[in-house]
């Protein structure tokens, strides 16, 4: 991921952020903050955030919000800390309250420690539901690798 602009501003549910990867050329890609400052049990680590990353690309840094749909998720939902914003990889570009249909009706994560599927609050699910991620904290480096894999290119190795 390329550095855009660092920020220490408190995240809010509904924040839309831009990011850029070399594989997208001059286009920006986008994500959205779904839950913030999650508590222990709700996330792999307390204080983390649940985000979506979308496949939509634009030459404009602020996307058409209607283009950011749950049908266009680039990767399954991810848990992340503040580092991508602090380092400048994610730049918040607009805030809009989350509306019905902009959040998956369920979240599914595989918990590798307990070897079970759980929702975003850590509750056990009877079965895997797609899209299904991992109940683990991602870093900006593992996010970069996941984005590269989703785009079908080799990871940057940074």
Image (spheres, rainbow, N blue to C red):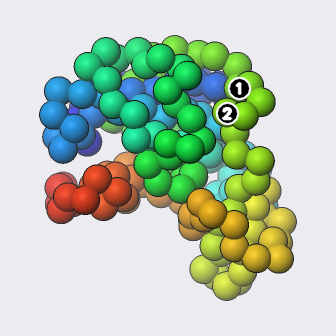
Name the residue that disc number 1 marks. Answer: 98
Q: Mark 2 touching mark 1, by CB under 8 A?
A: yes
Q: Is residue 99 above or below residue 76?
A: above
Residue plotted at (31% across, 23% down): 58
Viewer-nearest residue: 98 or 38: 98
* Residue 132: percent from left, percent from top: 60, 64
Residue most extreme to the bottom: 115
Cα gap from disc 2 to disc 1, whole angstroms? 6 Å
* Residue 40: percent from left, percent from top: 75, 57
* Residue 38: percent from left, percent from top: 72, 46
Q: Is residue 143 above or below residue 119?
A: above
* Residue 65: percent from left, percent from top: 54, 20
Residue plotted at (75% across, 61% down): 119
Whether residue 96 can be seen here: yes
Name the residue that disc number 2 marks. Answer: 102
> Which image quadrant is residue 129 in?
bottom right
Quadrant occupied by the C terminus: bottom left
How many marks can you see?
Answer: 2
Quadrant occupied by the N terminus: top left
Left or right position of 20 against 128:
left
**Crowdedness near tag 1: few (<14), some (14–19) or many (≥20) residues, C-alpha within 10 Å:** some
> Which image quadrant is residue 6 in?
top left
Residue plotted at (25% across, 59% down): 152
**Circle 2: element type:** loop
Viewer-nearest residue: 59 or 87: 59
Q: Is residue 145 above or below residue 97?
A: below
Whether residue 120 can be seen here: no
Viewer-nearest residue: 157 or 68: 68
Q: Closer to us: mark 2 or mark 1?
A: 2
**Circle 1: element type:** loop
**Crowdedness near tag 2: few (<14), some (14–19) or many (≥20) residues, C-alpha within 10 Å:** some
Residue plotted at (17% across, 27% down): 26
């Amino acid at each position: 991921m390329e550095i855009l602009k660092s920020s220490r501003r408190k995240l809010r549910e509904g924040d839309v952020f831009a990011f850029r990867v070399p594989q997208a050329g001059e286009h920006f890609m986008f994500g959205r903050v779904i839950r913030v400052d999650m508590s222990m049990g709700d996330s792999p680590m307390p204080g983390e955030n649940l985000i979506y990353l979308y496949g939509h690309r634009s030459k404009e840094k602020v996307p058409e919000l209607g283009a950011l749909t749950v049908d266009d998720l680039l990767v399954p939902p991810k848990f992340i800390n503040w580092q991508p914003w602090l380092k400048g990889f994610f730049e918040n570009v607009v805030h809009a309250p989350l509306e019905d249909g902009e959040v998956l009706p369920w979240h599914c994560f595989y918990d590798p420690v307990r070897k079970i599927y759980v929702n975003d609050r850590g509750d056990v699910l009877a079965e895997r539901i797609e899209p299904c991620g991992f109940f683990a904290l991602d870093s900006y480096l593992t996010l970069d690798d996941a984005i590269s894999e989703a785009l079908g290119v080799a990871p940057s190795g940074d």
